[in-house]
Amino acid sequence: MKERLDVIIIGAGAAGMMCAIEAGKRGRKVLLLEHSRKPGNKILMAGGGRCNFTNINIDASNFISHNPHFCKSALSRYTQWDFIAMVNDHNIPYHERDHGQLFCKNSSKDILDMLRSKCEIHVKTSVTKIATITEGGFNVHGENQIWKCESLVIATGGLSIPTSGATPFGYQIAEQFDIKVWPPSAGLVPFTLKPEDKKRMAPLSGISVEVTVSCNGQSFRENILFTHRGLSGPAILQISNYWNSGQNLCINWLPDMELDTTIIATAKFHPKQQLKTLLATLLPQRLVPLLIDENIAEKPLNQLTNSQIKNLTLRLKSWQITPAGTEGYRTAEVTQGGVDCDSLSSKTMETKTQIGLYFIGEVVDVAGWLGGYNLQWAWSSGWCAGQYV
Protein backbone atom coordinates (compact mmCIF):
# COMPACT_ATOMS: atom_id res chain seq x y z
CA MET A 1 0.00 0.00 0.00
CA LYS A 2 1.24 3.46 -0.83
CA GLU A 3 1.41 6.07 1.92
CA ARG A 4 0.30 9.47 0.62
CA LEU A 5 2.29 12.53 1.65
CA ASP A 6 2.56 16.16 0.65
CA VAL A 7 6.35 16.30 0.69
CA ILE A 8 9.19 13.79 0.72
CA ILE A 9 12.68 15.12 1.40
CA ILE A 10 15.60 12.79 0.68
CA GLY A 11 18.62 13.65 2.84
CA ALA A 12 18.51 14.81 6.46
CA GLY A 13 21.47 17.14 6.37
CA ALA A 14 21.39 20.87 7.02
CA ALA A 15 19.32 21.77 3.94
CA GLY A 16 16.93 18.84 4.24
CA MET A 17 16.13 19.48 7.89
CA MET A 18 15.60 23.20 7.29
CA CYS A 19 13.22 22.43 4.42
CA ALA A 20 11.31 19.91 6.54
CA ILE A 21 10.94 22.43 9.37
CA GLU A 22 9.60 25.13 7.07
CA ALA A 23 7.24 22.84 5.15
CA GLY A 24 5.94 21.49 8.46
CA LYS A 25 5.17 25.03 9.65
CA ARG A 26 2.87 25.36 6.65
CA GLY A 27 0.92 22.31 7.73
CA ARG A 28 2.36 20.09 5.02
CA LYS A 29 2.62 16.35 5.72
CA VAL A 30 6.36 15.77 5.42
CA LEU A 31 8.50 12.63 5.31
CA LEU A 32 12.24 13.25 5.81
CA LEU A 33 14.36 10.26 4.79
CA GLU A 34 18.00 9.63 5.70
CA HIS A 35 19.90 6.60 4.41
CA SER A 36 22.55 6.62 7.16
CA ARG A 37 22.13 5.75 10.81
CA LYS A 38 22.91 9.25 12.04
CA PRO A 39 21.49 12.38 10.38
CA GLY A 40 23.46 15.63 10.22
CA ASN A 41 26.93 14.04 10.22
CA LYS A 42 28.49 17.02 8.45
CA ILE A 43 26.90 19.42 10.95
CA LEU A 44 28.57 17.48 13.76
CA MET A 45 31.93 17.55 11.94
CA ALA A 46 31.74 21.22 10.94
CA GLY A 47 34.19 23.63 12.52
CA GLY A 48 36.18 20.87 14.21
CA GLY A 49 33.13 19.80 16.22
CA ARG A 50 32.10 23.38 17.11
CA CYS A 51 29.97 23.96 13.99
CA ASN A 52 30.86 27.13 12.12
CA PHE A 53 27.15 27.59 11.44
CA THR A 54 27.22 30.88 9.51
CA ASN A 55 29.21 34.05 8.92
CA ILE A 56 28.48 37.68 9.81
CA ASN A 57 29.49 38.67 6.26
CA ILE A 58 27.47 36.77 3.67
CA ASP A 59 27.61 37.88 0.06
CA ALA A 60 27.17 36.20 -3.32
CA SER A 61 30.88 36.84 -3.99
CA ASN A 62 31.68 34.24 -1.28
CA PHE A 63 30.23 31.49 -3.47
CA ILE A 64 31.34 29.73 -6.65
CA SER A 65 28.88 28.63 -9.32
CA HIS A 66 28.53 28.54 -13.10
CA ASN A 67 25.67 31.00 -12.43
CA PRO A 68 27.14 33.40 -9.84
CA HIS A 69 23.84 35.29 -9.47
CA PHE A 70 21.71 32.27 -8.62
CA CYS A 71 22.41 32.21 -4.87
CA LYS A 72 21.49 35.88 -4.34
CA SER A 73 17.74 35.32 -4.05
CA ALA A 74 17.89 32.61 -1.38
CA LEU A 75 20.64 34.33 0.62
CA SER A 76 18.69 37.61 0.68
CA ARG A 77 15.39 36.01 1.74
CA TYR A 78 16.78 33.81 4.51
CA THR A 79 19.85 35.60 5.81
CA GLN A 80 22.54 34.83 8.35
CA TRP A 81 20.62 37.04 10.78
CA ASP A 82 17.55 34.82 10.44
CA PHE A 83 19.53 31.74 11.38
CA ILE A 84 21.29 33.60 14.20
CA ALA A 85 17.83 34.54 15.54
CA MET A 86 16.89 30.83 15.60
CA VAL A 87 20.11 30.02 17.46
CA ASN A 88 19.37 32.80 19.96
CA ASP A 89 15.80 31.56 20.45
CA HIS A 90 17.23 28.22 21.54
CA ASN A 91 19.77 29.87 23.87
CA ILE A 92 22.71 28.23 22.12
CA PRO A 93 25.95 29.95 23.20
CA TYR A 94 28.25 30.96 20.35
CA HIS A 95 31.11 33.32 19.61
CA GLU A 96 32.67 35.13 16.67
CA ARG A 97 36.14 34.24 15.41
CA ASP A 98 38.29 35.77 12.65
CA HIS A 99 36.64 36.85 9.40
CA GLY A 100 33.12 36.94 10.89
CA GLN A 101 32.89 33.19 11.49
CA LEU A 102 30.34 32.13 14.13
CA PHE A 103 30.99 28.95 16.13
CA CYS A 104 29.15 27.15 18.91
CA LYS A 105 30.87 27.66 22.26
CA ASN A 106 30.09 24.11 23.31
CA SER A 107 29.45 21.61 20.53
CA SER A 108 28.05 21.16 17.03
CA LYS A 109 25.48 18.90 18.71
CA ASP A 110 23.69 22.04 19.93
CA ILE A 111 22.81 23.01 16.35
CA LEU A 112 21.87 19.46 15.35
CA ASP A 113 19.69 18.99 18.43
CA MET A 114 17.91 22.28 17.68
CA LEU A 115 17.07 21.14 14.14
CA ARG A 116 16.12 17.60 15.13
CA SER A 117 13.73 18.90 17.76
CA LYS A 118 11.73 20.58 15.00
CA CYS A 119 11.37 17.69 12.54
CA GLU A 120 10.95 13.93 12.46
CA ILE A 121 13.58 11.92 10.61
CA HIS A 122 13.33 8.37 9.29
CA VAL A 123 16.90 7.04 9.48
CA LYS A 124 18.40 3.99 7.78
CA THR A 125 15.85 4.43 4.98
CA SER A 126 17.26 4.03 1.49
CA VAL A 127 15.44 5.07 -1.66
CA THR A 128 15.78 2.55 -4.50
CA LYS A 129 13.71 4.19 -7.22
CA ILE A 130 11.82 7.38 -8.06
CA ALA A 131 9.05 7.47 -10.66
CA THR A 132 6.64 10.14 -11.81
CA ILE A 133 2.88 9.63 -11.57
CA THR A 134 0.70 10.36 -14.60
CA GLU A 135 -1.68 12.60 -12.65
CA GLY A 136 1.24 14.48 -11.03
CA GLY A 137 3.60 13.80 -8.15
CA PHE A 138 6.01 10.95 -7.49
CA ASN A 139 6.25 7.39 -6.30
CA VAL A 140 9.25 6.99 -4.06
CA HIS A 141 10.33 3.37 -3.61
CA GLY A 142 12.05 2.30 -0.42
CA GLU A 143 13.37 -1.18 0.27
CA ASN A 144 10.08 -2.34 1.77
CA GLN A 145 7.61 0.42 0.98
CA ILE A 146 6.38 2.87 -1.64
CA TRP A 147 5.42 6.42 -0.75
CA LYS A 148 3.43 8.80 -2.91
CA CYS A 149 4.08 12.54 -2.72
CA GLU A 150 3.15 15.77 -4.44
CA SER A 151 6.55 17.45 -3.91
CA LEU A 152 9.94 15.72 -3.87
CA VAL A 153 13.05 17.46 -2.51
CA ILE A 154 16.55 16.15 -3.19
CA ALA A 155 18.87 17.25 -0.38
CA THR A 156 21.42 14.46 -0.64
CA GLY A 157 24.56 16.62 -0.65
CA GLY A 158 27.73 16.18 -2.68
CA LEU A 159 30.60 13.71 -2.69
CA SER A 160 32.81 15.27 -0.01
CA ILE A 161 33.76 13.19 3.04
CA PRO A 162 32.38 9.77 2.00
CA THR A 163 32.61 8.57 5.61
CA SER A 164 29.78 11.00 6.43
CA GLY A 165 27.48 9.10 4.07
CA ALA A 166 28.07 11.09 0.87
CA THR A 167 26.85 9.46 -2.36
CA PRO A 168 26.19 10.55 -5.97
CA PHE A 169 22.47 9.77 -5.56
CA GLY A 170 21.33 13.38 -6.10
CA TYR A 171 23.23 13.69 -9.38
CA GLN A 172 21.74 10.40 -10.57
CA ILE A 173 18.21 11.68 -9.90
CA ALA A 174 18.97 14.89 -11.79
CA GLU A 175 20.21 12.89 -14.76
CA GLN A 176 17.12 10.65 -14.60
CA PHE A 177 15.04 13.78 -15.21
CA ASP A 178 17.41 15.10 -17.92
CA ILE A 179 18.66 17.93 -15.70
CA LYS A 180 22.22 19.06 -16.41
CA VAL A 181 24.85 18.27 -13.79
CA TRP A 182 28.15 20.13 -13.81
CA PRO A 183 31.02 17.66 -13.18
CA PRO A 184 31.62 17.52 -9.42
CA SER A 185 35.05 18.11 -7.90
CA ALA A 186 36.56 18.37 -4.44
CA GLY A 187 36.54 21.88 -2.93
CA LEU A 188 38.04 23.37 0.24
CA VAL A 189 40.62 20.61 0.13
CA PRO A 190 44.34 20.24 1.05
CA PHE A 191 46.98 19.93 -1.68
CA THR A 192 49.35 17.04 -2.22
CA LEU A 193 52.91 17.66 -3.41
CA LYS A 194 55.17 16.27 -6.10
CA PRO A 195 57.70 13.71 -4.73
CA GLU A 196 60.65 16.13 -4.84
CA ASP A 197 58.70 18.90 -3.09
CA LYS A 198 57.26 16.49 -0.54
CA LYS A 199 60.76 15.29 0.33
CA ARG A 200 62.20 18.76 0.89
CA MET A 201 59.15 19.94 2.86
CA ALA A 202 58.83 16.85 5.04
CA PRO A 203 60.82 18.46 7.91
CA LEU A 204 58.34 21.35 7.97
CA SER A 205 55.31 19.26 9.00
CA GLY A 206 53.35 21.05 11.71
CA ILE A 207 54.55 24.58 10.85
CA SER A 208 51.80 27.15 10.40
CA VAL A 209 52.37 30.65 8.96
CA GLU A 210 50.05 33.52 8.06
CA VAL A 211 50.53 34.27 4.37
CA THR A 212 48.71 35.52 1.29
CA VAL A 213 48.06 32.76 -1.26
CA SER A 214 47.00 33.66 -4.81
CA CYS A 215 45.81 31.76 -7.86
CA ASN A 216 43.67 32.67 -10.88
CA GLY A 217 43.23 36.26 -9.76
CA GLN A 218 41.93 35.29 -6.29
CA SER A 219 43.86 35.84 -3.04
CA PHE A 220 43.36 34.80 0.59
CA ARG A 221 45.19 36.08 3.66
CA GLU A 222 45.09 33.22 6.17
CA ASN A 223 47.33 30.57 7.70
CA ILE A 224 49.08 27.89 5.66
CA LEU A 225 49.91 24.57 7.35
CA PHE A 226 52.60 22.10 6.30
CA THR A 227 51.47 18.49 6.76
CA HIS A 228 53.18 15.14 6.18
CA ARG A 229 51.11 14.84 3.00
CA GLY A 230 51.39 18.37 1.62
CA LEU A 231 49.85 21.79 2.22
CA SER A 232 46.73 22.58 4.24
CA GLY A 233 45.38 25.30 6.52
CA PRO A 234 42.64 27.89 5.84
CA ALA A 235 44.56 29.75 3.10
CA ILE A 236 45.13 26.54 1.16
CA LEU A 237 41.56 25.29 1.56
CA GLN A 238 40.21 28.63 0.34
CA ILE A 239 42.44 28.87 -2.72
CA SER A 240 41.79 25.22 -3.66
CA ASN A 241 38.33 26.30 -4.88
CA TYR A 242 40.02 28.41 -7.57
CA TRP A 243 42.96 26.15 -8.50
CA ASN A 244 43.04 23.96 -11.60
CA SER A 245 45.34 21.00 -12.14
CA GLY A 246 48.85 22.01 -13.23
CA GLN A 247 48.59 25.61 -12.07
CA ASN A 248 51.02 27.38 -9.73
CA LEU A 249 50.19 28.81 -6.33
CA CYS A 250 51.81 32.14 -5.53
CA ILE A 251 52.64 32.62 -1.83
CA ASN A 252 53.62 35.89 -0.16
CA TRP A 253 55.41 34.78 3.01
CA LEU A 254 55.69 38.31 4.41
CA PRO A 255 52.42 40.05 3.49
CA ASP A 256 52.89 42.91 5.97
CA MET A 257 56.53 43.67 5.27
CA GLU A 258 58.71 45.34 2.68
CA LEU A 259 61.62 42.95 2.97
CA ASP A 260 64.10 45.09 1.04
CA THR A 261 63.51 48.03 3.42
CA THR A 262 63.87 45.74 6.44
CA ILE A 263 67.18 44.26 5.20
CA ILE A 264 68.67 47.68 4.48
CA ALA A 265 67.53 49.10 7.85
CA THR A 266 68.81 46.09 9.82
CA ALA A 267 72.15 46.14 8.01
CA LYS A 268 72.83 49.63 9.38
CA PHE A 269 72.70 48.41 12.99
CA HIS A 270 73.77 44.78 12.52
CA PRO A 271 75.97 44.75 9.41
CA LYS A 272 77.54 41.36 10.19
CA GLN A 273 74.23 39.60 10.90
CA GLN A 274 73.66 36.73 8.52
CA LEU A 275 70.62 36.84 6.25
CA LYS A 276 69.27 33.54 7.65
CA THR A 277 69.43 34.99 11.17
CA LEU A 278 67.32 37.98 10.18
CA LEU A 279 64.79 35.81 8.33
CA ALA A 280 64.51 33.49 11.36
CA THR A 281 63.15 36.48 13.31
CA LEU A 282 60.47 37.03 10.65
CA LEU A 283 59.53 33.42 9.82
CA PRO A 284 59.78 29.99 11.51
CA GLN A 285 63.45 29.03 11.52
CA ARG A 286 62.84 25.62 9.90
CA LEU A 287 61.12 27.33 6.97
CA VAL A 288 64.03 29.59 6.01
CA PRO A 289 66.16 26.95 4.18
CA LEU A 290 63.19 26.19 1.91
CA LEU A 291 62.91 29.81 0.83
CA ILE A 292 66.51 30.94 0.27
CA ASP A 293 69.57 29.34 -1.32
CA GLU A 294 72.38 28.04 0.90
CA ASN A 295 75.00 30.19 -0.81
CA ILE A 296 73.25 33.40 0.24
CA ALA A 297 71.83 32.29 3.60
CA GLU A 298 75.05 32.87 5.55
CA LYS A 299 75.98 36.15 3.88
CA PRO A 300 76.29 39.15 6.21
CA LEU A 301 73.59 41.71 5.48
CA ASN A 302 76.13 44.40 4.52
CA GLN A 303 77.51 42.16 1.77
CA LEU A 304 74.20 41.73 -0.04
CA THR A 305 74.02 43.60 -3.33
CA ASN A 306 70.98 45.66 -4.33
CA SER A 307 70.25 43.07 -6.98
CA GLN A 308 70.35 40.23 -4.44
CA ILE A 309 68.06 42.12 -2.06
CA LYS A 310 65.63 42.80 -4.89
CA ASN A 311 65.60 39.15 -5.96
CA LEU A 312 65.18 37.96 -2.36
CA THR A 313 62.20 40.26 -1.88
CA LEU A 314 60.63 39.09 -5.11
CA ARG A 315 61.17 35.44 -4.14
CA LEU A 316 59.60 35.71 -0.69
CA LYS A 317 56.74 37.90 -1.92
CA SER A 318 55.85 35.68 -4.87
CA TRP A 319 57.13 32.19 -4.07
CA GLN A 320 55.78 29.65 -6.55
CA ILE A 321 54.84 26.01 -6.15
CA THR A 322 52.82 23.63 -8.33
CA PRO A 323 50.80 21.12 -6.28
CA ALA A 324 50.63 17.54 -7.54
CA GLY A 325 46.89 17.51 -6.89
CA THR A 326 44.43 17.53 -4.01
CA GLU A 327 43.57 15.01 -1.32
CA GLY A 328 40.21 14.57 -3.03
CA TYR A 329 36.80 13.96 -1.53
CA ARG A 330 38.21 12.12 1.49
CA THR A 331 39.04 15.40 3.24
CA ALA A 332 37.21 17.96 1.05
CA GLU A 333 34.79 20.17 2.97
CA VAL A 334 32.53 20.85 -0.01
CA THR A 335 31.76 19.56 -3.50
CA GLN A 336 32.00 21.99 -6.39
CA GLY A 337 29.78 21.48 -9.42
CA GLY A 338 26.44 19.71 -9.22
CA VAL A 339 22.89 20.35 -10.40
CA ASP A 340 22.85 23.20 -12.92
CA CYS A 341 21.43 26.37 -11.37
CA ASP A 342 19.90 27.43 -14.69
CA SER A 343 17.67 24.35 -14.42
CA LEU A 344 16.19 25.61 -11.12
CA SER A 345 14.05 28.52 -9.97
CA SER A 346 16.20 30.74 -7.73
CA LYS A 347 13.04 31.66 -5.81
CA THR A 348 11.67 28.19 -5.07
CA MET A 349 14.53 25.76 -5.92
CA GLU A 350 12.04 23.83 -8.09
CA THR A 351 13.22 22.41 -11.38
CA LYS A 352 11.96 24.24 -14.45
CA THR A 353 11.17 21.08 -16.38
CA GLN A 354 9.64 18.78 -13.74
CA ILE A 355 6.83 20.18 -11.59
CA GLY A 356 7.20 19.28 -7.92
CA LEU A 357 10.90 18.32 -8.04
CA TYR A 358 13.32 20.44 -5.97
CA PHE A 359 17.07 20.41 -5.35
CA ILE A 360 18.66 22.16 -2.35
CA GLY A 361 21.98 22.44 -0.53
CA GLU A 362 25.32 21.01 -1.63
CA VAL A 363 23.88 18.89 -4.46
CA VAL A 364 23.31 22.19 -6.32
CA ASP A 365 26.15 23.91 -8.21
CA VAL A 366 26.82 26.41 -5.41
CA ALA A 367 29.97 26.05 -3.29
CA GLY A 368 30.93 28.54 -0.60
CA TRP A 369 34.18 29.65 0.96
CA LEU A 370 35.47 28.24 4.22
CA GLY A 371 33.91 30.02 7.18
CA GLY A 372 30.23 29.10 7.55
CA TYR A 373 29.20 29.95 4.00
CA ASN A 374 28.22 26.43 2.93
CA LEU A 375 25.99 25.89 5.94
CA GLN A 376 24.34 29.26 5.29
CA TRP A 377 23.63 28.14 1.71
CA ALA A 378 22.04 24.99 3.16
CA TRP A 379 19.85 27.01 5.55
CA SER A 380 18.86 29.52 2.87
CA SER A 381 18.14 27.09 0.03
CA GLY A 382 16.30 24.72 2.39
CA TRP A 383 14.19 27.56 3.77
CA CYS A 384 13.25 28.79 0.29
CA ALA A 385 12.10 25.37 -0.89
CA GLY A 386 10.22 24.93 2.38
CA GLN A 387 7.98 27.90 1.52
CA TYR A 388 6.74 26.26 -1.70
CA VAL A 389 6.84 22.45 -1.48
Image (cartoon, rainbow, N blue to C red):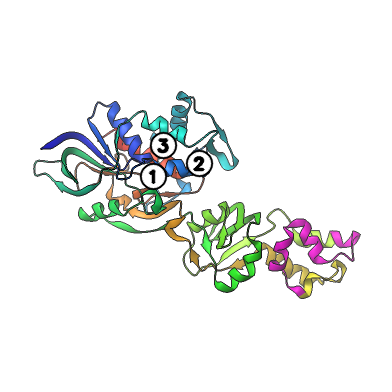
- Whether residue 140 sits left or right of residue 11 in the image: it is left
Circle 2 or circle 1, nearest the eye: 2
Of callouts 2 and 3, which one flags the residue occurring earlier in the amino acid sequence?
Answer: 2
- Looking at the rendered structure, the secondary structure element under dot 2 is helix
Question: Separation of disc 3 and disc 1 at Cα?
Answer: 9 Å
Q: Which residues are magenta?
A: 266-294
Q: Is residue 161 magenta?
A: no
Residue on which the image places disc 2: 49
Q: Is residue 216 visible?
A: no
Q: Quadrant of the N terminus?
A: top left
Question: Separation of disc 2 and disc 3 at Cα?
Answer: 28 Å
What's under tag 1, amino acid-wise?
Answer: Cys
Residue 389's quadrant in the figure?
top left
Is residue 140 positioned above or below 244 on the image? Answer: above
Residue on which the image places disc 3: 76
What's under tag 3, amino acid-wise?
Answer: Ser
